[in-house]
């Protein structure tokens, strides 16, 4: 039976040479012959999407970056971004229709130095925010710092669990003290980065502990877990089912996921297929978990690794690729009954990978600036007011 099947497949391919000309001339397939090379439709916006943008905390501006921000190259020693720079960023993001910045929040109990940097950055934002921009936290789950693994799960390392709960207690100060902290359907929003590494034999019990702990402080939580890029939705079912309210993938179009050329040639379609299947699986097979698409404006891994052979997702097309990814995000955001209509952009200012939305300006480094064009694309693609 197996040989008959292979024979029929071979016969079918030979009989369809008119559809697959590369079988005759042996030149190999092209992107246009790929089954995924379908057209991404333009999705008309009839209701605003809630747009969040990752705001990165870096110490010094990478000297290999050829672009120059409108505000000029800036550094963040110990998280201290110049207040004037933060004020400009808030105003620029408002032009794009970005609803909130998403700040990393590292462990105050196990990574205190970086926690202080994160706190300084968040305080600068709060101090410069005129009340027009919201913000949320992304707790950076560092399994190594917590001392947990598959062989040392949280329930067997009570010190680690207590440390993590203490981290959330410190985070609750941000929830409580600022009216501009994001809520989803009346619940306090908290992202958990690398949530696939929440090592436990009973993740439901761990998340119940987190919710109970924060509930005692007066907060009903909307928890969003991160899954690593390009991974199938069922891989971490025990980490997420019955645990989180929503899931997002680490950026598929950014440096973490764009490492294979076959994906690069049909990137919008490959992301669409990955998200469509994942979104349906999270919703239908994991108890109604929502999905939040995560897109990036561009990506250039050679800035940090000059000899990198990973594909470059450039800005030479005037934003055409990014517009397609915006439409892929709209196609896969949860907009139906019970949906949250949210999308993420990675990032606002990750200049070391050219993944930033932040505007650049004319300079002497030999690159054509994109200016505020990506801000305009975000507003055009996700807001009803252009």
Image (cartoon, rainbow, N blue to C red):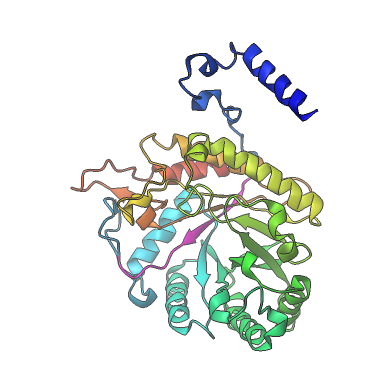
Give the quarter of the figure containing the N terminus: top right
Q: Position of residue 258 (x, y in %)?
A: 48, 47
Q: Is residue 280 visible?
A: yes
Residue at 64% x, 53% y is 292
Residue at 59% x, 50% y is 230
Please state the total of marks drawn on the protein image.
0
Q: Position of residue 282 (x, y in %)?
A: 74, 53
Which segment did they paint magenta?
48-60
Q: Is residue 338 visible?
A: no
Drawn side of residue 229 relative to residue 11, left or right:
left
Q: Position of residue 291 (x, y in %)?
A: 68, 52
Task: Note whether 78 is above or below 70 in the view shown.
Answer: below
Task: Note whether 54 is above or below 21 in the view shown.
Answer: below
Q: Position of residue 344 (x, y in %)?
A: 56, 53
Q: Nearer the viewer, residue 70 or 243?
A: 243
Q: Nearer the viewer, residue 336 or 63?
A: 63
Drawn side of residue 125 relative to residue 10, left or right:
left
Q: Nearer the viewer, residue 160 or 322?
A: 160
């Amino acid at each position: 039976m197996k040989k008959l099947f292979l024979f029929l497949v071979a016969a079918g391919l030979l009989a369809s040479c008119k559809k697959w000309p590369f079988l005759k001339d042996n030149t190999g397939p092209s992107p246009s012959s790929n089954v995924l090379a379908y057209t991404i439709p333009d999705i008309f916006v009839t209701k605003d999407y809630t747009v969040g943008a990752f705001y990165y905390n870096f110490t010094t501006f990478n000297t290999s970056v050829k672009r120059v921000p409108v505000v000029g190259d800036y550094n963040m020693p110990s998280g201290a971004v110049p207040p004037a720079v933060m004020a400009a960023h808030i105003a620029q993001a408002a032009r794009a229709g970005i609803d909130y910045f998403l700040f990393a929040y590292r462990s105050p109990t196990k990574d205190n130095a970086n926690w202080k940097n994160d706190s300084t950055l968040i305080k600068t934002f709060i101090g410069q925010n005129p009340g027009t921009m919201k913000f949320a936290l992304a707790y950076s789950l560092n399994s190594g710092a917590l001392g947990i693994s598959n062989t040392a799960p949280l329930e067997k390392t009570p010190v680690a669990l207590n440390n993590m709960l203490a981290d959330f207690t410190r985070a609750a100060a941000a929830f409580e003290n600022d009216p501009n902290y994001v809520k989803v359907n009346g619940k306090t929003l908290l992202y958990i980065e690398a949530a696939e590494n929440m090592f436990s034999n009973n993740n439901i019990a761990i998340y119940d502990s987190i919710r109970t702990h924060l509930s005692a402080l007066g907060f009903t939580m909307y928890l969003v877990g991160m899954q690593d890029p390009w991974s199938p939705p069922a891989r971490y079912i025990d980490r997420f089912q019955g645990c989180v309210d929503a899931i997002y993938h680490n950026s598929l179009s950014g440096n973490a996921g764009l490492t294979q050329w076959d994906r690069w040639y049909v990137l919008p379609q490959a992301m669409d297929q990955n998200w469509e299947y994942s979104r349906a699986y999270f919703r239908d097979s994991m108890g109604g978990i929502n999905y939040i698409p995560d897109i990036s404006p561009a990506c250039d891994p050679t800035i940090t690794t000059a000899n990198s052979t990973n594909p470059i997702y450039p800005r030479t097309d005037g934003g055409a690729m990014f517009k397609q990814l915006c439409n892929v995000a709209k196609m896969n955001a949860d907009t139906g009954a019970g949906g949250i209509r949210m999308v993420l952009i990675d990032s606002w200012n990750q200049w070391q990978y050219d993944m930033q939305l932040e505007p650049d300006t004319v300079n002497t480094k030999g690159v054509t600036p994109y200016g505020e064009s990506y801000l305009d694309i975000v507003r055009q693609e996700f807001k009803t007011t252009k």
